[in-house]
Amino acid sequence: MSSEGEASSSRFTLEGIDDVEDFPWWNEGEGSSMSWERYSYLYDIMQMGNQAFRENRLDQAIELYSRANNIKPSDIIILSNRCAAYLRHFLKNRPPSASEYRPLSGLDPTTHAGLALKDADKVMNLQSNSVTPYILKANALILLEKYEVARDVIWSGLHVDPRSCPLLNLERSTAKTFSRRSHVNPQRTDDYDCTVCLKLLYEPITTPCGHSFCRSCLFQTMDRGNRCPLCRTVLFISPRTCSISVTLKNIIQRNFPEEYAERRLENDSLTNPGVDLLPLFVMDVILPCQKFQLNIFEPRYRLMVRRIMEGNRRMGMVIIDSSTGSIADYACEVEITDCEPLPDGRFFLEVESRRRCCIIRNWEQDGYRIAEVEWVQDIYPKEGTAERNDLMEMTNKAATFAREWMKAAQEAAQGDRVRLAELFKAEGLMPSTQDPERFSFWLATLTNRRPSERLDLLRLRNTKEVLLLNSYLSSKYVQSSYVRTNFSVLPFDYSQNLFSCIIDHILSSHMGFWCRGSIEDWFI
């Protein structure tokens, strides 16, 4: 028997929790310690909890089992059923698509496995002669990646029932794990292991209370509070200022060089997925030459940000394509220029968009998406050709129009500090006209665009087309009711002149479908 849950880190399949045990009715001798009315209420709660479990509504099932536990504490069936619900409620097993239309909040993945372990221990203390608590505890330990302890529990359970299929399956799974790790030096003790990840210390940090942890493990636990994970002493350290214990690192690296090299490769694979691999943040369409701020609160994205900050500080931002229902085929790489960890575990980020990419394929890793990408650049005409000269002339003309528009908009926004700050910020990001591609995308950031329009801009490979499209949309933006309402001092003849000049240039450019009628029809 196996469940659908699977620990993403080691590919173990949970065993023996396909279903939960039904709660007995009064006439089966279980209600002698409480009144009939109270037992009937408890029975109804357990029935609803079991139904929620079987319909995979695990949050509701856990809540109902907890209510039942408050009515009748230390009941074996209640604790066993809640333990099974915690095991199934493993956040890493949720597909990324489940939360790309709405935020996925909740406890960190290992928290549910830890709560399941507590319930399994209670059941084992109450019913050590049954195989059920051994199955539950072994599953919880495997999800926590405590494989050696899990193996001991499995062997103890097999003494109770040597023919238990779930325990035998779990024993085979752990045996495969240990066979893959057969190269590990058996003489090494756990003195050099991190008590959080139970692996060899990598970039160790020794806290003022005297305990040592992997750097990434310590700061991951500090997302939920500034206490030592082992002794709960309050720690006054910061990820930005805390240094690695060089002496301990040298001792480990000298005595266990192969294992430390393996830990380095493991850490690098998480923090630097590869030259053409990019972790994805599913939110909106972003264009190059933009700066903005993000508040990261979902557990899966907090994990992703921690890994990015240890690597190249870059990720891809992408949107769900409304036409396909899946992530779009084009994304934009952004760089985290500032990261401020908050006391409650959130991250406040300042990011700047860099370059476009085409998503070739994507897959799931620990709850978020990783994509294999192909970097995209515009196709420029050759130097010295008439097409190249025409492109540079168009870029310079668009830059002149943009500066005039920017100046008029700043004068109009003198009474609006927020809008004025936005305009100054946009002006500071203006690229040189010697880079027509980046300039064309900067021009696109001056006006509000629908996500579908921004996605179309990302797909274009002809800088001239992007400039023409941007100029047209900017002129329409200048004439819009929003601008007339908020920037009433903008001269209307200026916007009309801008619109006429751009349309005349479009008509004289002889670019196939880029004629006046087709553009206006496209944007009606």
Image (cartoon, rainbow, N blue to C red):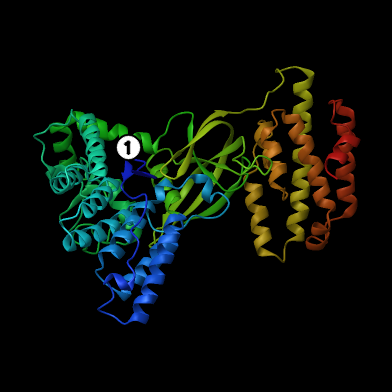
Q: What element carries label 1?
A: helix
In the displayed structure, 363 sits above or below 426; it is: above
Quarter occupied by residue 286? top right
Of residues 502 and 96, which is closer to you in this image?
Answer: 96
Q: Which residue lies furthest to the front in this view?
A: 27
Quarter of the image holding residue 313? top left
Which quarter of the rendering shows the C terminus? top right
Percent x, y of residue 460: 70, 31
Numbered marks: total: 1
Can residue 397 be seen?
no
In what quadrant of the picture does the N terminus appear?
A: top left
Looking at numbered disc 1 in the image, what kind of residue is underneath it? Asn
Q: Where is residue 342 in the image (x, y as percent from the top left)?
A: 41, 60
Determine the image quadrant of residue 79: bottom left
The residue closer to the viewer here, 366 or 55, is 55
Q: Position of 340 compared to 73: left or right?
A: right
Does any portion of residue 195 appear in the rendered image?
Answer: yes
Residue at numbered disc 1: 267
Q: Position of residue 196 (x, y in %)?
A: 24, 50
Q: In this view, does 256 lie to the left or right of 103?
A: left
Q: Which of 403 and 104 is in front in this view?
A: 104
At x 29%, y 59%, the residue is 80
On the image, the x and y values in percent for residue 61 come to: 41, 62
Judge the density around disc 1: few (<14), some (14-19), many (≥20) Cα neighbours within 10 Å. Answer: some
